[in-house]
Each structure stands twice: as C-alpha cells, then as structure tokens.
Amino acid sequence: MLINCVVYNDGRKQADIPLEEISAHLHQPDNFVWVALQDANEEELRAMQEQFGLHELAVEDVLNGIQRPKVEEYDEHLFVYLQVPAYHGGKVHIGQISIFVGPDFVLSVRQNCEQTLLGVRERAEREPHLLKYGSVYVMYALSDAVVDLFFPVVDALDDELEQLETAMFHNQETRKNMERLYEIKYKVNVLRHALLPLADGFSKLYGGRVPALVGDAENYFRDVHDHIMLLNSQLDSMRDTISTAIQVNLSLITIDHGEVNKKLAAWGAILVLTTIFTGIWGMNFKYMPELHWKFGYPLALLIMASCAIYLYRHFKKTGWI
C-alpha cells in the first residue's frame, strides 16, 4: 500500500506524484524521490524494483519476511533492513522496515510495523538545509528514528526489572518471580537480536572507506552508531542483572528450604525425645517400679512435657521454630 510518493529538489518538497511519474523525476539535477510503502505485496515491490533498478537479492529479503538487521552495499544503491520495536501490554512487538537508497531516490517499506514513522518526513521537511544532503539524509533520519524507538522500550523493561527485584525480597512467590525473570530475559534478547547486528552495519558508514552515497553525512551515521552502542550496553547490563537476580532467587529458594528443614528438624527432635520416654515406659518389664507407683503416670507425662517445652523454648530462641 502506498503511503507517500514525493519529489524533492534542493532539499525542498516539490510535489506529491503518482508512482507512474517517478521515472520522469529521476536523474534530474538536485532531485530525489521519496516513496513510502506499507505492507507492500510482491507486485508493488516488483514495480519499485523496475523503477529504481533494485538488486534482486535485496528485494527477495523484503519478500521473505523477517531477516537479520543489516546494512548492505550494492552497485547502485544501499539497502538497510531494520527491526522496529513497540511495547504495550507487557509484550515486545517487532516490525520491519526496509530502506533502499540511491543517488536520486529513497524507498522505505514497512512490514507488520505498529509505528507509523510519519514524523520522520515532517522533521526532514522542516530541515531543508539537511535535506540538501539528498536521499542519504532521509536514510539517516529513518534509521535514527527507528533506533530511538528502542530507548523507551529498554527503559520500560528496566523499570519492570527493578520492580521485580524489589518484589523478590517481599513476597514468597518464587516460582512466579522466576517466570517473570525469564520473560524479561526473553524480551531483552529480542531487542539484542534487533540491535546487535546494526553496530557492525552502521560502522561501515563512517570512518575509513564508506559508500560513495554517504558523502559528507558520515557524522550523522556515527551518531546513530553511538546510540546503538549505548542501547547494546544497557541491554548487556540488564542481562547481567537478570542473571544475578535468577541466582539470588535460587538462593532465596534454598534459604527458604533450609528454614523449613530446620523447623522440621526441631519438631522432629521434640517428638523423638517424647518417643524415647514412651518407648522405655512402654516395655512393660515386670520389675519396673514406676508401673506400680501411684504417681508414675502423671510424673512420666510431666517429664515428657517439661523436656518438650525446654526443647521448644531452646529452638525458639535459636530461630529454628
């Protein structure tokens, strides 16, 4: 589905045009065309491939669905594949955006994406002095907007993790806590898989040999790379925290089991002692004076009760009960 098809000249919007007129505006001085598609079908992508001369392998990547995030250089254009995060209902949702960039065109294709990214076009059009960089600036603006979408998602997961860490020491739902920790770990891994490959991809766009299309825009891509590295650092820190929290949770479970075992041992000691007395007096030997003494039975009960009370108070004092 077509979202926009706009021609720009010298950084300023000229007109919205139909797809059929794209070729008339290509290869014109200071012109570039920006086409945005959403959930494009194969027919639409093949039409764009013919219009812009897109490489077959890059088009196949878009058609095949979820790919590993990457930045690839072809003879006539650059291809950037990004995963776009959204966070609601306690779940991370991942969409995709593919960006084709040539000297005089930009084609962005969003697939299964909950983020509109319409603000990127508005921002670019408010900055014609930057839009003069041409199609490569649009590529930067889209990439920067997508990477920035990761920050609120990472912050939300960080807050969720902090709340869970606090709850671990105030409730006994150890199994539930462990399940939530693994849920957060899964979300963090989803984000890492979307970000980690981009660090290598965007490192190719500044410093040393860079694609000719990048031109003087290297510093902008360095900024995107810095954001990616910052996010990766935050996610690595969260992974370490989750691993530590899992170990702490297991330790708390062990401590709880130890407390239960101590209580069982204490009550077992009390029962064993009384069982010893009842075992001795229950042997019914003929010459056991206690059996024929008037106060033998009450005294036996008193001795057993006294010993049980003494042991109970001792274990209570040491914290075993």
Image (tube, rainbow, N blue to C red):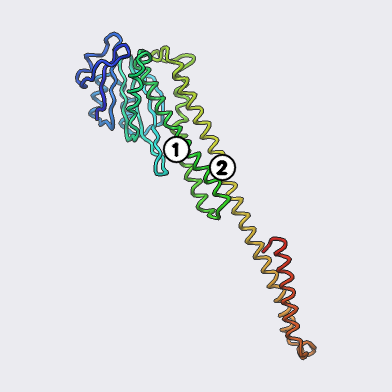
Q: CA distance from mark 2 to mark 1?
A: 16 Å
Q: Where's residue 103, x and y in %?
A: 33, 14
Q: Where's residue 61, x and y in %?
A: 34, 29
Q: Quadrant of the N terminus?
A: top left
Q: Which mark is residue 190?
A: 1
Q: Amino acid at mark 2?
A: Ser
Q: Quadrant of the C terminus?
A: bottom right
Q: Is residue 199 left or right of residue 314?
A: left
Judged from the image, the secondary structure of the residue bearing numbered disc 1 is helix
Within the image, what quadrant is residue 205 found in?
A: top left
Residue 142 lies, with reference to residue 274, above or below; the image says above
Q: Where's residue 178, x and y in %?
A: 52, 49
Q: Amino acid at mark 1?
A: Val
Which residue, given by chain and number where applicable, does mark 2 sit on?
243
Within the image, what quadrant is residue 297 found in?
A: bottom right
- In the image, 172 versus 110, the foreground residue is 172
Residue 262 lies, with reference to residue 297, above or below; the image says above
Residue 286 lies, with reference to residue 167, above or below; the image says below
Q: Residues within 10 Å of mark 1 (few under 14, many from 20)?
A: some
Q: Outermost residue toward the top?
A: 29
Residue placed at 63% from the left, 54% from the top? 255
Judged from the image, the secondary structure of the residue bearing numbered disc 2 is helix
